[in-house]
Amino acid sequence: MYTTELAVVLRAENYRENDRMLTLFTRESGRVEALARGCRKIGGSLSAVSEPFSCAEVQLYRNKNRITVTQCAPKENFYEIREDFEAFACGSFLLSVCEKCVVPESPERKLFALLVNCLFALKKKADPVDTALFFMLRLLSHLGQDIELSHCIHCGNAETTAIDFEAGGASCKNCSGVPFGPDFIKLLRYMKASGVKSIIDTVFGADKASAFQFIGHALDISQIGRPKSYDFFMKLLSN
């Protein structure tokens, strides 16, 4: 069976002499493991879909044992991300998170759009920490684990200085939670209410230590876990 799907390459591993096994995030089918034959050949017809970050319309052939990429029409290679070390670290983190949380052969159109929009933001030189923080806020909502930020989730106090990740909301100084400070909570509220275009147009200036602490806890409660790309991204941007 042949299908045509819009895909982002999450992972590419060499296979035999000229091929690669691709982990794709497709808008129509979620995570797909597919073989791209001859994509490593110079000038090969599938070279546009042989690298992580590549976005292309792909034709997939499904048989009982394997899925194969038979054709591709490139849409965006996000070359600018590859040329910027910090953007590359952030983008690699986003790809890793999607690889862990996207279910095989299950459409995730909203998450696909979130990933592509964040990659375009990085291409346009958006701040990598702001982009990752925005992505994780939206991902938690997508996974049904939205963080309530308008008031203390325990007592209703409007002045919040911490987040209780287990309870799923902000907390005040009198209640339990991981301390972040009122300014960071306000930034999260503003970011949560903003559209994806705001990442490009606005420098939120999130405190890096607080941002990575939030992202780490978000990865934990979502049961995604902390991929190696998170550690690399955090160490690089924390220096």
Image (tube, rainbow, N blue to C red):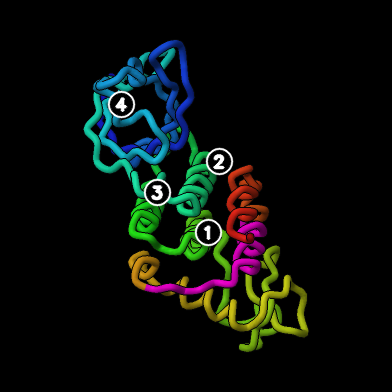
Q: Badge 2 is on which residue?
A: 100
Q: Residues within 10 Å of mark 3 (few under 14, many from 20)?
A: many
- For badge 1, the amino acid type reads Met
Please check the rendered image and state whether residue 70 is part of the magenta-colored stretch, yes or no. no
Tell me the quarter of the image containing the C terminus: bottom right
User: How much space separates mark 1 and mark 4, taking CA atoms?
Assistant: 31 Å
Residue 47 disc label: 4
3 or 1: tag closer to the N-terminus: 3
Q: Residues within 10 Å of mark 1 (few under 14, many from 20)?
A: some
Q: Badge 3 is on which residue?
A: 81
User: How much space separates mark 2 and mark 4, taking CA atoms?
Assistant: 25 Å
- For badge 4, the amino acid type reads Ser
* Secondary-structure class at tag 1: helix
2 or 4: tag closer to the N-terminus: 4
Is 188 placed above or below 65 here? below
Task: From the image, state whether disc 2 or disc 4 is nearer to you.
Answer: 4
Task: From the image, state whether disc 2 or disc 3 is nearer to you.
Answer: 3
- Say which residue appears at 49% left-offset and 65% top-offset: 130
